Amino acid sequence: MAGPCKSGALRMESSWKYRFLVKLCLRLRLSIALKRGYAVTTFKMSNDAMAPELRTGDLVAVDTRSAGQPVRVGDLVVASIKCASWDTASEGGSSSDRESSSEDSESAGEEERRLVVRKVAAVAGDPIPHDGPGSGSAVPEGCVYLLANDRSKGPDSRTSDVGARPLSDILGRVVAVRRGGRITWL
């Protein structure tokens, strides 16, 4: 049984109740937010920008309690990215039942905001990776540098109009993936 944290809250990640709710969300494509601090939602991957870790059709469970909170290098997160180059790297993002498409764009050439799953490559104070805009400088305070495994499938922080993203753009951390009938915990 998980003991209390310093704040008095249960360690949700190790509790059987938390794991049960994540499995339930993944099986039924639900979102759950309970009074005890559980907040999990699911998103379906619509492309292979994060392959081989995540593929088209995979269902990811996202812990939305971590929205806007500091993340670690290597975390997979769902972020809301605004980018004018969606047409050159078509990405439906990872979305639940509210999938977005290029037809939803208000007008051509305007920036469109979409939900995407990306890996945290650098956090505030870390050097920007060598292949990104501003490489050599540090990630600004309160921001993260997000990368796709295959940037031809969707923009990431290496795209000039995306760059480092503020923590407020992070909707949550991916905690589990369902591929087929199998659930993998991250």
Image: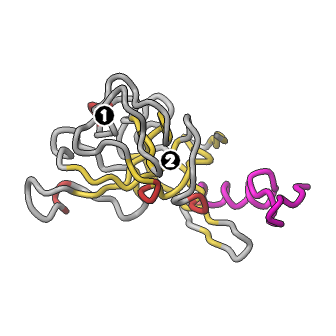
Q: Nearer the viewer, mark 2 or mark 1?
A: 1
What amino acid is at disc 2? Answer: Val
Q: Amino acid at mark 1?
A: Arg
Q: Residues within 10 Å of mark 2 (few under 14, many from 20)?
A: many
Q: Quadrant of the C terminus?
A: top right
| Residue 99 highlighted magenta (yes or no) | no
Q: Residue at x 40, y 63 (%)?
A: 97
Give SS at disc 2: strand
Residue at 58% over, 41% down = 72
Residue tagged by mark 1?
Answer: 158
- Identify which residue is drawn at 56% across, 61% down: 64
What range of the chain is rendered magenta? 1-26
Residue 79, how many percent across, how many down?
42, 52
Residue 37: image location, x then y, percent: 70, 69
Q: Which residue is mark 2?
A: 77
Side of 170 where 181 appears, left or right: right
Element type where label 1 sits in the image = loop
Q: Who's the residue at 62% across and 48% down the image? A: 175
Across and down, in percent, residue 104 comes to 19, 62
| Residue ranking furthest to the top | 130
Question: Who is closer to the viewer here, 98 or 159?
Answer: 159
Question: Is residue 51 shown left or right of residue 63?
Answer: left
Does the magenta-highlighted stretch encompass residue 9?
A: yes
Give 140 or 161, whichever is nearer the viewer: 140
Q: Nearer the viewer, residue 46 or 77?
A: 77
In the image as oriented, which residue stretches furthest toward the left? 108
> For the residue carrying disc 1, how many other residues have a C-alpha within 10 Å: few (<14), some (14-19), or many (20+)?
many
Numbered badge on residue 43: none
Identity of the residue furthest to the bottom in this view: 35
Q: Examine the image and state in which quarter residue 169 appears.
A: bottom left
